[in-house]
Amino acid sequence: MPLPFEKSIDELEARIRDMRSFAQEQDVDLSGEISALEQRLVTLTRDTFANLSRWQRVQVARAPGRPTALDYLTRVVDDFTELHGDRTMGDDTALVGGLARLGDTGVVVLAQQKGRDTKENIHRNFGMAHPSGYRKAMRLFDLADKFNLPVVTLIDTPGAYPGIAAEEQGQAWVIAASIQRMSRLRVPAVSVVIGEGGSGGALAIGVANRVFILEHAIYSVISPESCAAIRWRDAAEAPSAAEALKLTAYDLLEQGVVDEVIEEPIGGAHKDPGAAIETVRVTIERAFAELRSRAPDDLIRERRERFRRMGRFLDAA
Amino acid sequence: MALERWFRRKRPTRGDDDASPAGLWLKCSGCHAQIYRKDLAANLYVCPECAHHERMPVDARVEMLADEGSFERWSGAVEPVDALGFVDTEPYRERLTSVQQRSQRPDAIVTGAATLHGIPVALAVMDFSFLGGSMGSVVGEEIARAAERAADEGRALISVSASGGARMQEGALSLMQMAKTTVALEALSERRLPFVSVLSDPTTGGVTASFATLGDLVVAEPGALICFAGPRVIQQTIKQDLPEGFQRSEFLLRKGMLDDVIPRSELKARIAAFTRLLLAGIGTAGVVPAALPEAASTEPDDVAEEPDEAIGHDEDEEAAVRAPAV
């Protein structure tokens, strides 16, 4: 289903498809007309996506059909093998972890997985991890350190799950601990925000040496809906909240929260998942090529300094 | 994450509104008894009727914890900016200005050096009355600096949290303070200096999910709301009633999340005792306490004597707290 602002793009695509099948059925040459329409489609898509409001970008970040973490994993790394369980109380299906190969090195991978349909969404708890997910992340960080395996994390979550069990099991405690554990990794760590970077639940696996974000992904302290409910006392003000929160990829680059924006195919990653996935692969490989020769102490120090610098204030001293 | 509104609604008619003309008598938000304001302050803002722990003004908190005359303020050099140009029903910049004028503080935290029963410490005390104690760039920076300076000067860090979470008006920059405060604590860890985190009512969201739960010891005051997601958010998500006492200190103690729940009147003595023990490991007794002043002798029986000493001291402290500056 197209997003509201994609409607005219969608209609144009449909017209091109119709014209193609008409040309084929009737065996007439409409290639001139078709290529003119295709040109218009490119321009329309590019213009539409260049001028998206922040709220519209939130919708792209959450768009059905946008590649999910597992879609990336199948092509960004080779031989992904999932490793289950936190060794304490369960296996969280919203936060997937495992081993894989990237080029000539083994890597530990952590990825927040949303569903591609309702059934999978329920299975994945809509990408919202319980404490068990972060405990699994931490045990895999241990594994990464022990075997000198670089860490890749793919971030895509509305947030850590706000539920009774999650609170009882120490959601806040495990997020803090995961932030701390990841900051202490002795191996290179790279994070990519591929969709929604939802607050502490995202940051818990985002304390990397390099943090990338896809062009239409978002990263925020709170969802626009919750922010609107609190600050405007009206969830319908979510578009205003999205504007105020400055949560788009380029906003975050400007704030120094991310290191680089990864461009998406025209019309967003959901229009051409293959191309989006390939760009992410190249970016991650490039980052590791740069980081792989660093000494563990340097990696830790640089990662700490990266996060220690965060924030804006006036310093009178 | 920030839960300011929720707290504001639940907020009883009491507390830090010194400007209010009706401020002589307060209603306890636990038992609803009418309490003479000065009696409440003299009792460390704990209801004399039902022992309900009211939120405590920051200056009174500092006075309660620091040995008399020992507190030396560190915070205040950094001031918040409106990095995002955030406007909701009112511009963030204006909100800041008005709360700064009222509180006479640049942001929602006070840090400084002190001794606590003779132990050199750094104190970091959050101010819930300042935009819900929310953590933006300045709060994060002050905590980070306090941790680093404490490490430099050989002090233990004692934090008292009271916060609605990350400050949403500073967007992802606030979120990043969770990581910033966490990495700043490493300086203390490396020097094996204790960090005791006290959670007071309320400690929520991004503060709970970062430095506040990373103490070597994490303790809470009785009845404090301590959570990641607030009760209202959870209720909206699951559409069920929440269990009795959910997300309160005693509940979290039973769930294994806290080292202990400590009444306010005992807090200073217990923190001092904890800190002395943490500094008294094998082979460290002769090393770390070198940073302590003469008062904190390194004789082995110093630890054993501590509790008695502390209680005596606290009575003096109570007197000092009668006229808090806030």
Image (cartoon, coloured by chain):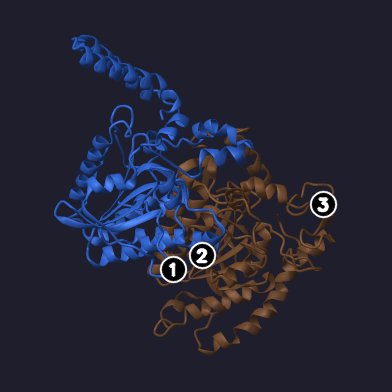
Chain colours: A blue, B brown
Label 3 sits on residue:
B23
Q: Nearer the viewer, mark 2 or mark 3?
A: 2
Please, what is the three-letter code of the amino acid marked with disc 3?
Answer: Gly
Q: Which mark is residue A149?
A: none
Q: Are marks 3 and 1 on the same chain?
A: no
**Residue B209 versus residue A239 in the image, above or below:** below
Q: Secondary structure at mark 1?
A: loop
The residue sitting at 41% across, 79% down in the picture is B287
Residue A76 versus residue B282: which sits nearer the camera? A76
Please, what is the three-letter code of the amino acid marked with disc 1?
Answer: Met
Label 2 sits on residue:
A169
The residue sitting at 42% across, 70% down in the picture is A88
Q: How packed is label 1: few (under 14 Cα within 10 Å), some, or many (20 or more)?
A: few
Side of A214 relative to B10 (left or right): left
Determine the CA span between mark 3 and mark 1.
Answer: 51 Å
Q: How packed is label 2: few (under 14 Cα within 10 Å), some, or many (20 or more)?
A: some
Tell me which chain the residue with mark 3 is part of.
B
The residue sitting at 65% across, 69% down in the picture is B68
The residue sitting at 52% across, 83% down in the picture is B297
Residue A87 versus residue A143: which sits nearer the camera? A87
Side of B66 relative to A1 (left or right): right
Contact check, label 1 and label 2, Cβ < 8 Å: yes
Residue sitting farthest toward the left: A104
Determine the CA span between mark 2 and mark 3.
Answer: 41 Å
Give residue A108's position: percent from left, percent from top.
27, 58
Tell me which chain the residue with mark 2 is part of.
A
Assign the N terminus of chain A to one quadrant of the image: top left
Q: How many numbered callouts?
A: 3
Label 1 sits on residue:
A89
* First along the sequence among labels 1 and 2: 1
Q: Secondary structure at mark 3?
A: loop
